[in-house]
Image: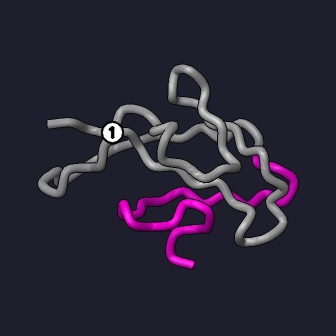
Amino acid sequence: MDLPTAWNPDDKSSYLSVDSSRLRLNYGGLGESIEDVGAIRANHPIPPHCKLFYFEVDIINEGKNKAIAIGFCEKTVNLNGLPGW
């Protein structure tokens, strides 16, 4: 069973860069509109039969507007906007 272990550098918005470890992201946008966002998917989806899945995120810099969203989305969600908007 493949579990998510890192970010997928090939499945992200244009505002994000991923370091070589694929564990650290950098947002390069201005964060001034709902279209100016960074979203990324993991290297593997959480399997549907996985009843409990745990992950951690460290926010190193909250940015100028201090607006950060963390969540889950399906493969079809556009990553150049916030999921659900």
Q: Main secondary structure of the magenta part?
A: loop
Q: Residue most toward the bottom? A: 85
User: Which residue range is magenta in the image?
Assistant: 62-85
Q: Secondary structure at mark 1?
A: loop
Q: Relative to the observer, which residue lies in front, 85 or 68?
A: 85
Position of residue 22 in the picture relative to residue 34 (left or right):
left
Q: Position of residue 84 (x, y in %)?
A: 51, 76
Q: How many numbered marks does the figure carry?
A: 1
Residue at the image point whose x is 12% and y is 54% from the top: 49
- Whether the magenta-drawn stretch holds residue 56 is answered as no
Where does the image place residue 8, in percent across and percent down from the top left? Answer: 45, 39
Q: Quadrant of residue 67?
A: bottom right
Q: Can you say which quadrant of the picture contains the N terminus?
A: top left
Q: Is 45 placed left or right of 31 in the picture?
A: left
Residue at horizontal 45%, vertical 49%? 41
Residue 78 lies, in percent from the top left, at: 51, 66
Residue bearing the label numbered 1: 4
